[in-house]
């Protein structure tokens, strides 16, 4: 959910906690697609053609947004305010065009990582479990046992993730519902239902999410969170969306894979950085994670991933995953936002988790 532990967060908060040079040392070598360069190759296949089509759509959306803003500005009575409104709309259009270009370069670079073939996973419902009380090959890095609960601290705000006793059939595949709730200033900020499917070979697939973002506005009486966005919501089989891999059964260092596919809406991808992490084994990764936390959960068996989306090419998340626990720490290397596991209810190590 930078992200919940199950799926990347769409926003980040907090100040940088390491210097820019230190961040660059960790981030830049990891994968070209996260910080795309101008030298990325031009179109050459289905993936690149998809990226080009999305670029056209992005520019068209920017144009439409500009004319909507212009319509609003036209109805501002004060001449000075009207002119300022128009100037702001023009600036937003220019920034949107720049962003579209960055997204295009990021998508093309991702194509170099995943290949130029069409993204069209051929999934058979018979290859997936339907009884989540008796899984064929549970993935230790995404424990989908009903009732499992994780509590995280996201720079002082709580995040709760729990596996519900609820399923949803999507494209014939039985998915378990994972509730992901983010709080800010004591109120619900994001409430999401994620739909995960356990393949019998151990892969965990991500079939979509229903996102609800809330905001509380000063001056409102009563003060109550309002639904302001469902951006990022997608469901495999609806509007061309397709499932992705949440976590592979046998991760391989250097492996890059799509976690979701809903062009222009949900395009997260991940890269496996290491499958044998323990604190002290990698100085660059050591500098991001709390030592006591990593030493508690990792014994040369933790997986570390780098995750991001071409929609926000400058946002990079490094995530740490322990067998039997799942995701226990993540950091947004752009903003410095940290998400740390502080409690869980299904493993003896949960009681020993350190306080951030």
Image (cartoon, rainbow, N blue to C red):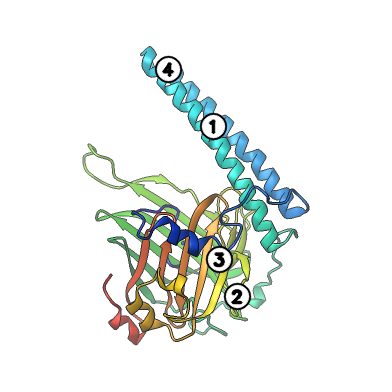
Q: Give the residue number, with chain letter if any, for mark 2.
A: 253
Tell me the distance, in whole angstroms, between the alpha carbons under discs 2 and 4: 54 Å
Q: Closer to the camera: disc 2 or disc 4?
A: 2
**Between discs 1 and 4, the one toward the N terminus:** 4
Relative placement, left or right, of 75 versus 63 is: left
The answer to whether the residues at label 2 and label 3 have Cβ atoms under 8 Å apart is no
Residue at position x 61%, y 36% in the image: 59
Q: Which element carries disc 2, helix, strand or loop?
A: loop
Q: Quadrant of residue 223?
A: top left
In this rendering, which labeled residue sits more in front, label 3 or label 1?
A: 1
Q: Residue at x 42, y 56 (%)?
A: 20
Residue 47 percent across, percent down from the top left:
72, 54
Residue 90 drawn at (x, y percent): 50, 26
Q: Earlier in the sequence, mark 3 or mark 1?
A: 1
* Residue 246 in sight in this render: no
Q: Which sits earlier in the primary sequence, circle 3 or circle 4? A: 4
Question: What secondary structure is marked by label 3?
Answer: strand
Label 3: how many Cα within 10 Å (few below 14, some 14–19, many 20+): many
Using residue 349 as the reference point, say whether residue 211 is left or right of it.
right
Q: Of the residues under marks 2 and 1, which one precedes in the sequence? A: 1
User: For the residues marked 2 and 3, what is the alpha-carbon distance in whole angstroms?
Assistant: 21 Å
- The residue wearing badge 4 is 83
Report the residue marked by disc 1: 94
Residue situated in front as seen by the camera: 199 or 87: 87
- Crowding at label 1, few (<14), some or many (≥20) Cα neighbours within 10 Å? some
The residue pinned by badge 3 equals 206
Give the class, few, some or many, for how many residues have Cα within 10 Å of label 4's Cα (few <14, many ≥20): some
Counting other residues with Cα less than 10 Å from the Cα at mark 2, is it few (<14), some (14-19), or many (20 or more)? some
Q: Is residue 61 above or below residue 325?
A: above
The residue mark sitting in front, 3 or 4, is: 4
List x then y, in percent, for residue 183.
31, 57
Residue 251 to residue 41: above or below: below
């Amino acid at each position: 959910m930078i992200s919940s532990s199950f799926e990347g967060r769409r926003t980040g908060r907090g100040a940088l906690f390491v210097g820019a040079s230190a961040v660059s040392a960790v981030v830049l070598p990891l994968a070209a697609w996260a910080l795309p360069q101008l030298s990325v190759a031009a179109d050459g296949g289905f993936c690149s053609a998809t990226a080009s089509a999305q670029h056209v759509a992005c520019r068209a959306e920017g144009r439409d947004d500009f004319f909507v803003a212009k319509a609003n500005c036209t109805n501002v009575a004060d001449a000075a305010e009207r002119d300022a409104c128009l100037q702001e709309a023009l600036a937003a259009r220019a920034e949107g065009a720049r962003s579209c270009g960055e997204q295009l370069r990021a998508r093309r670079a991702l194509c170099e990582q995943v290949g130029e073939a069409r993204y069209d996973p051929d999934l058979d419902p018979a290859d997936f479990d339907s009884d989540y009380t008796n899984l064929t090959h549970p993935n230790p890095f995404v424990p989908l046992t009903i009732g499992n609960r994780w509590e995280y601290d996201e720079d002082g705000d709580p995040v709760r993730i729990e596996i519900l006793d609820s399923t949803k059939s999507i494209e014939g595949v039985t998915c378990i519902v994972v509730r992901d709730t983010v709080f800010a200033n004591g109120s619900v900020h994001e409430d999401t239902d994620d739909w995960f499917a356990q393949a019998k070979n151990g892969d965990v697939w991500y079939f979509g999410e229903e996102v609800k973002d809330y905001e509380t506005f000063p001056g409102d009486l009563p003060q109550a969170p309002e639904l302001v966005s469902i951006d990022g919501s997608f469901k495999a089989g609806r509007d061309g969306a397709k499932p992705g891999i949440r976590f592979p059964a046998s991760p391989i260092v250097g492996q890059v894979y799509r976690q979701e596919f809903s062009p222009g809406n949900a395009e997260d991808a991940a890269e496996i950085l290491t499958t044998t992490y323990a604190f002290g084994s990698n100085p660059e990764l050591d500098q991001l994670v709390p030592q006591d936390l990593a030493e508690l959960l990792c014994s040369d068996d933790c997986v570390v991933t780098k995750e991001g989306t071409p929609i926000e090419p400058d946002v990079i998340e490094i995530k740490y995953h322990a067998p039997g626990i799942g995701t226990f720490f993540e950091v947004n290397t752009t903003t410095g936002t940290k998400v740390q596991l502080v409690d869980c209810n299904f493993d003896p190590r949960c009681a020993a988790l350190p306080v951030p």
